[in-house]
Image (cartoon, coloured by chain):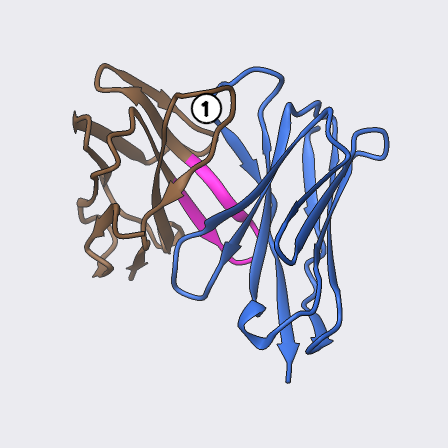
C-alpha cells in the first residue's frame, strides 16, 4: 500500500550495530504499529502508538525502541542488533473511526543481522 | 493461555474449486475477526471483517463464517483462481472494546493450480 512506506526495504547489518527502520504514512491515521514476522510465528507486535504522545510496548519489545516524530512518522530502532532479530518488519496504521480496527500495512523491511 | 491456530500446512487445490481455510482460537472473546491476504514479500492486505454477532459475511467470491461457540472462523474462496494463491491470515480483536490491537494467526498458504 503506497500510503504506508517503509525505508529501507532491505538491510544487512552486523551484531552490535544500532539501526533504525522508518515508517511514513499519508493516510492521516492516528494509530501506528510495528510488527515483526518470522516463519511459522506470524505477526508479533513490537510497539504501538495511538498518537504522538502515546507509545506502548507490544508483546516483544525487548531490544527495540521507537520514536513517534509526528502523526505521519513512526521509527523503530534496534539499539544493539543481534542475529535473532533477523526478520521481516512491518509498519501498520489504523484509524479511530467506528468501533472496528482495520490495519493498513507497509511493504515491509527485510533485516538480516550477521 | 490465549492461542490462535491456522493450518500451517499449505492448501493445494485445483482452479475452479472452493478453498476453505480454518482459524481456531482459544481463551478469547473477540468483538470481531478479520481476514487478510499476504503475497510474498509484501504486507498483509485487509479482506473481510465479521463481528461476534454475525454468522456469515460475503464479498464477491469470498465468504467468512464465525462460530463463537466453536471458537472458529472459516474462510471460503469460491471458483478459485491461480491469482488467489497467497497466504491468508486471520486476526482477532483483543477483547470486546476497540483497543486498537489485533492478534494474528500464523497464516495458511493457499496454492491454486490451473
Q: Percent from the top left, x then y, of residue B111? A: 63, 73
Quarter of the figure with the C terminus of chain A:
bottom left
Pick the front one: A54 or A103: A103
Q: Percent from the top left, x then y, of residue B104? A: 56, 41
Question: Is A8 left, or right, of A58 in this rendering?
Answer: left
Q: Chain of mark 1?
A: B
Q: Vertical placement of A46 versus A16: above or below?
A: above
Name the main secondary structure of what is drawn in magenta. strand
Give yes or no for residue A40 being in the magenta stretch.
yes
Furthest-left residue in this view: A69
Q: Percent from the top left, x then y, of residue B6? A: 69, 50
Q: Which residues are magenta?
A: A35-45
Q: Vertical placement of A1 versus B40: above or below?
A: above
Quadrant of the rendered image containing residue B113? bottom right
Give yes or no for residue A16 being in the magenta stretch.
no
Instruction: Tell me which residue sits at (61%, 19%) in the image.
Output: B95
Quadrant of the rendered image containing residue B27? top right
For mark 1, what is the residue?
Answer: B100
Question: Is B33 left, or right, of A64 in this rendering?
Answer: right
Pick the front one: A54 or B110: B110
Question: Is B95 left, or right, of A60 in this rendering?
Answer: right
Chain letter matching colour blue: B
Q: Colour of chain A?
A: brown
Instruction: Tell me which residue sits at (21%, 19%) in the image.
Output: A52
Furthest-bottom residue in this view: B114
Amino acid at each position: 500500500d503506497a500510503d504506508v512506506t517503509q525505508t529501507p526495504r532491505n538491510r544487512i547489518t552486523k551484531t552490535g550495530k544500532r539501526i533504525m527502520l522508518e515508517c511514513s504514512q499519508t493516510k492521516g491515521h492516528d494509530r501506528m504499529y510495528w510488527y515483526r514476522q518470522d516463519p511459522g510465528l506470524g505477526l508479533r507486535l513490537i510497539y504501538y502508538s495511538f498518537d504522538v504522545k502515546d507509545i506502548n510496548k507490544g508483546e516483544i519489545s525487548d531490544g527495540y525502541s521507537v520514536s513517534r516524530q509526528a502523526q505521519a512518522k513512526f521509527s523503530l530502532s534496534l539499539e544493539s542488533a543481534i542475529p535473532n532479530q533477523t526478520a521481516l518488519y512491518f509498519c501498520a496504521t489504523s484509524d479511530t473511526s467506528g468501533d472496528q480496527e482495520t490495519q493498513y500495512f507497509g511493504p515491509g523491511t527485510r533485516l538480516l543481522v550477521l | 493461555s490465549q492461542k490462535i491456530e491456522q493450518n500451517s500446512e499449505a492448501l493445494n487445490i485445483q482452479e475452479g474449486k472452493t478453498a476453505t481455510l480454518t482459524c481456531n482460537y482459544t481463551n478469547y472473546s473477540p468483538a470481531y475477526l478479520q481476514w487478510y491476504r499476504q503475497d510474498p514479500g509484501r504486507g498483509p492486505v485487509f479482506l473481510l471483517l465479521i463481528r461476534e454477532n454475525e454468522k456469515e459475511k460475503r464479498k464477491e467470491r469470498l465468504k467468512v463464517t464465525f462460530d463463537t461457540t466453536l471458537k472458529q472462523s472459516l474462510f471460503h474462496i469460491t471458483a478459485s483462481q491461480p491469482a488467489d494463491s497467497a497466504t491468508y491470515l486471520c486476526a482477532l480483536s483483543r477483547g470486546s472494546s476497540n483497543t486498537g490491537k489485533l492478534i494474528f494467526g500464523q497464516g495458511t498458504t493457499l496454492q491454486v493450480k490451473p
